[in-house]
Image: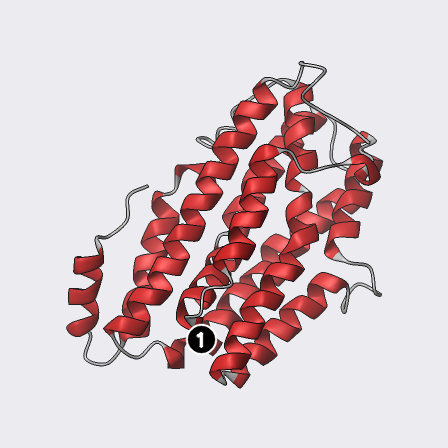
Amino acid sequence: MDTPPNEELRAMTKDSKGDAGRVVFTATQAVLEAADFLKPETNPVARQTDPKSLTYSLEQYSLLPLHIIDMLKLAQKAAARAGWQPVVTELERNIGQERGSETKGVSHYRILTGAMHDEFGMDARNIVAHQATNEFIHSIKELLHNPNPHYCLGIAYALESSAVPELTVVLSFVKKLAGNRPLQEGTKSFFDIHLNTWEPSHESELRQAVSPYINDSATAQAFYEGFTVTIESMRKWWDGLAEEAGRVGTPSLIDRP
């Protein structure tokens, strides 16, 4: 992954005339734009064509919405310890939406898995995390126990700011899996509202809430490090997911309870 060196970021923030937040968010955007796994044409799963491989990847991906609430709650605890009430409030709004505050109490995870059941007959009750997904989920939760709140919020911002390109990738292989037929309304609705409303709002509102607390090179550096380590963990997850998906025909790989 092509990211600005730490020394360069420090120099940029020192010359930023007090606007370290602007500098670091410009740097994080550059990281996202350079991440090949966040593009449908270069994501290692989206390039696959075997229906079994794509189904496997979709099943494993569906576990991220299940665990994202726990991740955001850990970030919220870090913000609360630092006394960053606007960040706590924004993450509470985000967590509430994930749990179903705007969808009649139905969580986003249940909406996704329900849509995938109707679309492809996928049964979420039988999905277990395999190595790549398990390592990714546990690594992010472990990283969120870092005592530096700027680092933890860099992790949370990476999860939110990467959501639109990542969901665009997922939608690309959902369409590939569906073949020539149009997607059902539930599937279309899930992706439409996430791509056009919820995820852009999560990113922009979290950025606005966090910005006042990124006020020098040290805080910018910690935020940036949390961000980049998360993007790198995501890259490893997608690479591992693609490798597992390529072996999906091996009966011993998918161990359903």
Horizontal side, residue 151 vs residue 257: left or right: left
Q: Is residue 229 above or below residue 208?
A: above
Task: Give the image location of residue 93, x and y in percent.
Answer: 65, 73
Task: Give the image location of residue 61, x and y in percent.
Answer: 64, 40
What SS does tag 1 mark?
helix
Task: Give the image location of residue 179, x and y in percent.
Answer: 69, 23
Quarter holding residue 131:
top right
Write the residue at 70% across / 51% down: 66
Residue 202 or residue 72, whichever sits in front: 72
Kind of residue indicated by mark 1: Val
Task: State the residue position of label 1.
Answer: 210
Residue 110 or residue 200, whichever sits in front: 110
**Disc 1 residue crowd, few under 14, some 14–19, many 20+, Cα 10 Å:** many
Residue 204 or residue 54, whichever sits in front: 54
Question: How many badges with numbers are in the image?
Answer: 1
Horizontal side, residue 105 vs residue 36: left or right: right
Write the residue at 81% across / 35% down: 126
Residue 218 or residue 106, whichever sits in front: 218
Q: Is residue 215 visible?
A: yes
Task: Give the image location of residue 169, x and y in percent.
Answer: 55, 39
Of all residues, the one furthest to the top in this rendering is 250
